Image (cartoon, grey):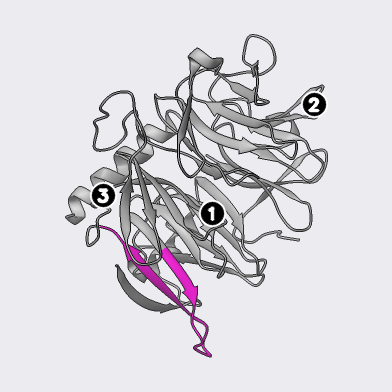
């Protein structure tokens, strides 16, 4: 992909999402500071203008996927950025997961990237980039999951791929019709998750959701009670209920038998829901485009937005860290919840 095409492709990605919801191995030093990063720090105090993902790994490090600055890494001391200049193939980070061996995997606008810490005493980080040199086909990727069997699943613009530790292969879902499109299509999977029984769930951009039990598929659509066939995110709660955040129909909760739907007609402000998360208290948090986030305790909805300090109307990610603190990111940066209101966390902190 030429530099011009790459930049145009990224610009198209950012514009669209702002308006909606073997490889090669290289090493770089974690403490490396680039000129571009120094300019960013002087011009913008936010970690990034747009935080798409926040993920805390098993060692307590934070990883933040951005919309154009690559991945930001906070190790308890400071923030480092990794993108093309550091041989990390990605400027837009759309998914983050960790496998059983503590490798971190990223879905990006340029493919899939894996990293692991080396034994180098200087703390160098090794990236393995999977892109046009593999069967991934130089595509934009939107989701990634390391499952309990240590398989890596990745959702692209055209469908699903699976990595068995040696090679990537396409994984065909039983789509009801042919799906076409280089950037996004009906088969585009924004979310891949594994439930407690080991089933793998795939969202699609127009075919509803698919459940794979290892042998067969179950498709869930509006015909079954799902509120919308364009599914952005899938979550399983501690009771085994499946939650679906959709592009045009709000939220659906499926208990295995029937659906309960929450829409702008009865409970939330907008039907575009890009993020879902269950905290350790069992509350379900979800975004609603233009309305910040909602917290549902099983009975009541509580909305947090500008009046509570959350200056992110287009929320893309919600996560809880090991200390029980809730984080929210999206267009406007990164925010942490203190129990009643939200605090903006910038390059300078505060992280504690």
Tell me if I can see residue 275 in this picture. Answer: no
Asked if the stretch drawn in magenta spans residue 135, the answer is no
Circle nearer the N terminus (3, 2): 3
The residue sitting at the front extreme is 215
Q: Give the alpha-carbon distance from disc 3 to disc 1, as whole Å.
A: 32 Å
Question: What span is in magenta?
Answer: 114-131
Asked which secondary structure carries label 1, the reply is loop
Which SS does the magenta portion mostly show? Answer: strand
Please report the residue visible at 46 percent of the width from the left and 21 percent of the height from the top.
229
Query: Callout 1 environment at 10 Å: few (<14), some (14 to 19), or many (20+)?
Result: many
**Residue indicated by mark 2:** 298
Please report the residue visible at 63 percent of the width from the left and 66 percent of the height from the top.
61
Q: Give the alpha-carbon distance from disc 2 to disc 1, as whole Å.
A: 28 Å
Q: Is residue 248 left or right of residue 16?
A: right
Q: Residue 333 — which label?
A: none
Query: Callout 2 environment at 10 Å: few (<14), some (14 to 19), or many (20+)?
Result: few
Q: Nearer the viewer, residue 197 or 29?
A: 197
Up/down of 49 relative to 306, above or below = below
Q: Position of residue 112 (x, y in %)?
A: 37, 57
Q: Closer to us: mark 2 or mark 1?
A: 1
Q: Quadrant of the C terminus?
A: bottom right
- Disc count in the image? 3
Q: Closer to us: mark 3 or mark 1?
A: 1
Asked which secondary structure carries label 2, the reply is loop
Q: Residue 7 — which label?
A: 3
Please report the residue visible at 34 percent of the width from the left and 61 percent of the height from the top.
89
Q: Residue 147 — which label?
A: 1
Q: Nearer the viewer, residue 20 or 298?
A: 298
Q: Is residue 9 left or right of residue 48?
A: left
Q: Quadrant of the N terminus?
A: bottom left
Q: Nearer the viewer, residue 346 or 77?
A: 77
């Amino acid at each position: 992909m030429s530099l011009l095409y790459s930049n145009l492709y990224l610009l198209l990605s950012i514009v669209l999402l702002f308006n909606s919801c073997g490889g090669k191995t290289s090493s770089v030093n974690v403490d490396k500071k680039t000129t571009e990063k120094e300019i960013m720090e002087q011009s913008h105090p936010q970690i990034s203008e747009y935080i798409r993902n926040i993920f805390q790994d098993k060692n307590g490090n934070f990883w933040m996927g951005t919309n154009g600055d690559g991945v930001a890494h906070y190790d308890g001391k400071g923030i480092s950025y990794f993108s093309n200049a550091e041989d990390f193939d990605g400027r837009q980070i759309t998914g983050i997961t960790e496998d059983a061996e503590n490798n971190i995997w990223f879905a990006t606008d340029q493919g899939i990237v894996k990293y692991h810490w080396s034994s180098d005493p200087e703390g160098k980080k090794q990236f393995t980039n999977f892109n046009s040199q593999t069967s991934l086909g130089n595509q934009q990727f939107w989701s990634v999951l390391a499952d309990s069997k240590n398989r890596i699943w990745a959702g692209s613009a055209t469908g699903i791929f699976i990595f068995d530790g040696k090679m990537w292969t396409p994984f065909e879902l039983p789509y009801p019709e042919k799906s076409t499109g280089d950037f996004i299509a009906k088969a585009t999977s924004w979310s891949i998750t594994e439930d407690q029984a080991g089933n793998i769930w795939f969202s699609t951009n127009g075919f509803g959701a698919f459940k794979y039990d290892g042998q067969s598929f179950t498709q869930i659509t509006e015909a079954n009670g799902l509120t919308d066939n364009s599914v952005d995110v899938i979550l399983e709660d501690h009771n085994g209920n499946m939650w679906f955040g959709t592009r045009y129909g709000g939220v659906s909760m499926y208990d295995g038998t029937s659906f309960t739907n929450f829409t702008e007609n009865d409970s939330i402000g907008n039907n575009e829901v890009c993020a879902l998360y269950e905290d350790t208290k069992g509350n379900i948090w979800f975004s609603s485009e233009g309305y910040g986030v909602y917290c549902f305790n099983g009975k009541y909805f509580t909305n947090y937005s500008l009046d509570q300090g959350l200056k992110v109307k287009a929320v893309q990610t919600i996560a809880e860290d090991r200390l029980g603190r809730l984080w929210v990111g999206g267009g406007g940066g990164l925010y942490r919840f203190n129990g009643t209101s939200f605090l903006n966390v910038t390059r300078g902190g505060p992280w504690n």
